[in-house]
Amino acid sequence: MSTYFPSGKNLEQFRQWHVIDATGMTVGRLASEVAHILMGKHKPSYTTFLDMGDHVIVINASKIVFKGNKTDEKFYRHHTGWPGGLKEISARELLAKNPVRLVELAIKGMLPKTKLGRAMGSKLKVYAGADHPHGAQKPLPLAIAAKKN
């Protein structure tokens, strides 16, 4: 009996497309599940140094929720590069202004900080509404079970 080991060639033909509806889901729980799929850890052929993951489309990003007081207490910061250029925006403001960016930041923050992680992040598509232009890829709906505390 021989062991199967992926070579890294023609990986695109084995990738599937998934659609996840983010309505009413918690940001962190959604992000961890999507990052798991983007990395390919849900497949038995997962290899740490290859991009084995699938494509993920997240719809209804504007209907995502935070638990507790995170909408007011959580801040997203970036620096412009100029002196005194630290900018910050609360989660409530970012959710109202650009919910796609909020979901992308959460998911990409859970991917590896390497070239491979950036390649995994490029397979993520996030949309604020229910419509997406990826119907030709025939994405499969993926239901993520909400965990009870």
Image: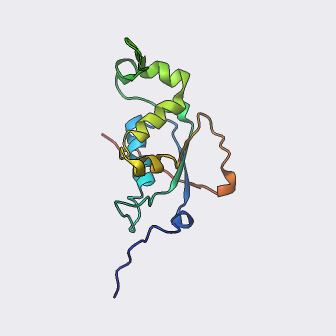
| Residue furthest bottom as drawn | 1
Give the image location of residue 132, x and y in percent: 65, 43
Q: Is residue 53 visible?
A: yes
Q: Is residue 63 visible?
A: no
Name the foreground residue: 63 vs 53: 53
Left or right, residue 48 beside residue 9: left
**Which residue is at a point 42% across and 58% down the rendered structure image?**
40
| Residue furthest top as drawn | 84
Which quarter of the image is occupied by the N terminus?
A: bottom left
Name the foreground residue: 147 vs 128: 128
Q: Quadrant of residue 91?
A: top left
Name the foreground residue: 116 vs 22: 116
**Which residue is at a point 35% across and 85% down the rendered structure image?**
2
Left or right, residue 68 beside residue 99: left
Which quarter of the image is occupied by the C terminus?
A: top left
Is residue 10 positioned above or below 108 on the image? below
**Which residue is at a point 45% across and 20% down the rendered structure image?**
92
Give the image location of residue 30, x and y in percent: 43, 42
Is residue 65 positioned above or below 114 on the image? above
